[in-house]
Every structure is written in C-alpha cells, then in structure tokens.
Amino acid sequence: MKTQSSEYYISEINRLKEEKNAIILAHYYQTSDIQDIADFVGDSLALSQKAASNSADIILFAGVKFMAETAKILAPRKKVLLPDMNAGCSLADSCKAVDFEKFIKANPGRTVVSYVNTTAEIKALSDIICTSSNAVQIVESLPPDEKIIFAPDRNLGNYVLNKTGRDIVIWNGTCHVHEEFSLEAIIRLKKENPAAKIIVHPECELPVRMVSDFIGSTSALLNFTRKDNRKCYIVATEVGIIHQMKKENPEKTYIPAPPRDSTCGCSECSFMKLITIEKIFNCLTKENPEIIIDKNILLKAQKPIRRMMEISEKLGL
Ligand code: 13P
Ligand code: SF4
C-alpha cells in the first residue's frame, strides 16, 4: 500500500472514527502525534476505566497488547482493535501461565495480586489486579494478615512491600525500559541541574527509587509536575510522558533519564513505539487486527479486574 502524508492519515482516521463510532484510547508512552489524535490519553488505570465506560462500538487501543486485552475483558461486546499484535510487553512476557501456575502451587494459601501488565491467562489465575496507580492501596485493602503473591514486576512488588510491610512473595520479572535507567547518569544530571527534582516510576530499581524526590505511576508523575512549583524535572520513565508534561506546563524543563547503554539519552519502550499513525489508519479501515480472547479465560479474568475497579472507585482513584 502507498504511504501517504501524516495529514492524510489524521484526517482519514477522524473520518473513520465518526463513521464507525470508534474511539482511540492511547497510553502516555505513545508518540506525540498519536497522543494528539486520541480521544483519551491516560495511564493503565485511567485507560481501563475509560474502556469500561464509553458509548463507542469500536475501541482502537494505541498501546500494548495487555492493555487492549484488558479493554476487551472490561467491554466484551465491543470490538477492540490493536494496530500491531507484536506490541507486547517484556514484563508480561516474563510471566508465562504454566510457570505461574507452578509458582502459585509452590506458595499455597496466598492471595494473588497481579499487575495489569500481564496476559489475560495470568489475570485469570489471579485474585485481584492492580496498576502502578493503585498497587499500594489494593494491597492495603486486603486484611493485614493476608499472605500475598505479587506478580510479575519485582521492582513494583518491592516498592509495595516496603510501603505496606505486608507478607509478600514476589515474582522475578522486570520491564526492559524501567530496569535500564542509569543511576550514575541520573546523579550526574542532578549535579548539572541541582534545582531539578528526580521523578521516578515504581517499576524502576531500588537505587533509582532511593535518589528520587517523587515516585508514581505515569499519571501521578504528570500530576506532580502540574502541581509542584519547581521548574525542572529529571524524568525516569518512558520518554512519551514528557509530551503531556510539556503540553500542560511548557515553561518547565523535563530531562529524560537515560538508560545504561544508550547514546540517544532517553528511554523508549520498543513495543509501544510499534504503533504508528499509518497502522492506526490501516487497522481502523480493515477493523483488524482484533483482540479475541477465549471466553473461559475472559470470564475468569473479569473478576479480579472488576475487583480492582470497585476498590479504585471506592477510594476515588
Ligand atoms: P502506568 O500504570 O503508569 O500506565 O504504567 C504502565 C506501564 O507499562 C509502565 O511501564
Ligand atoms: Fe511493558 Fe515496560 Fe513497555 Fe511498560 S514500558 S509496556 S512494562 S515493556
């Protein structure tokens, strides 16, 4: 197919959305052009909440597969499209259902709290889901003596354990983006910009979290830069979030924290960046690739996700 200009794709996407009663939900880690054509941009929790309550017939998910699957689980009657099925997640991939079943068996009597960054199969094996926005509150909502399995992110799990002091066994998974931030480079950037605050996603390793001024999910980081009165931030999460930060407070400076082995100086999620405006156009035109989940798995996965949504709503998250 002939490649067209981005103006052409954007105007066609807007026409197709109208014609098909479709909405585009985009994660903060998408490229700026995609964030700007989306009907809604958010973090994993806000995107799940939006997927569960909208009047569209089609949801096109500009994000990664586990996010689109979560949307399908919450809105099973809607058609959910993902422009590139290869948009996976190294963290979700680190936790395979066969191995996780063995892990649960090896740690009996524990409540299984799984991060939303998991496949539908892992969600179906879980008691409750969380996102980085609500992980601490979800764990705190459980009775104090409840023993817990937390999967799959070991850094988020360790952060939750430190915050709550609960009895938690943690799956040994990591994200290829957040695991890779260079502590040395962050410290050097802070020396060069002493007035900057270091803001960090909880998927980052402990030493990086320890030098931070604030830890939070992507929307919590955005909110922090919105309300905080400093003018400069060193941002340790995927670089896409900086687009929204700049949009909201263009007078401030945002310095992306670099990964250990980089020459480019910023950190990108290669899976998130598989989604392009051209692929969104093709996907909306053909209504394909579509997310299809085995009915049994979908029904089993619904319960722990809904449990998370109910607790989040009660807590006003
Ligand atoms: P958020 O919960 O901040 O959206 O994080 C999602 C994610 O994939 C982080 O790597
Ligand atoms: Fe997965 Fe990490 Fe990409 Fe988030 S940034 S989607 S956890 S690989």
Image (spheres, rainbow, N blue to C red):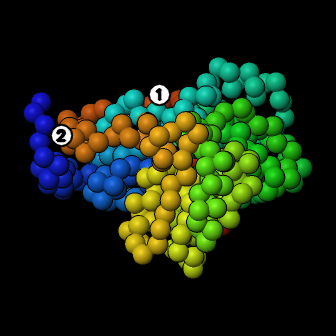
Q: Identify which residue is drawn at 79% across, 24% down.
A: 105
Please tell me which residue lies in front, 228 or 255.
255
Q: Which mark, by number, is residue 294? A: 1
The structure residue drawn at horizontal position 86% and vertical position 53%, both measured from the top left corner, is 165
Which residue is at a point 58% across and 66% down the rendered structure image?
193
The numbered mark, 1 or 2, whose residue comes first in the sequence reads 2
* Amino acid bearing label 2: Thr
| Residue 275 place in picture, x, y as percent | 33, 40
Which of these two is toward me, 294 or 88?
88
- Of labels 1 and 2, the one closer to you: 2
For residue 117, the mark is none
Q: Report, in whole angstroms, how far the alpha carbon at label 1 lies from the one at label 2.
A: 25 Å
Whole-percent x and y of residue 203? Answer: 64, 46
Mark 2: secondary structure:
helix
Disc 2 Cβ-to-ligand 2 distance below 8 Å? no
The amino acid type, in three-letter code, at marker 1 is Asp
* In the rendered image, the vertical position of residue 176 relative to residue 309, given as above or below: above
Crowding at mark 1 (Cα within 10 Å: few <14, some 14-19, many 20+): few
Name the outermost residue toward the bottom: 229
x 55%, y 52%: residue: 257
Q: Specify whether 94 is left or right of 55.
A: right
Along the line of sight, which residue is nearer the eye, 316 or 161?
161
Tell whether 195 sits left or right of 23.
right
Q: Which residue is mark 2?
A: 285
Task: Please provide percent x and percent y for residue 14.
Answer: 18, 55
Circle 1 — which element? Answer: loop
Quick one: label 2, few (<14), some, or many (20+) residues within 10 Å?
some
Q: Is mark 1 within 8 Å of ligand 2?
A: no
Task: Identify whether 221 is placed above or below 20.
Answer: below
Horizontal placement of 140 versus 303: left or right?
right
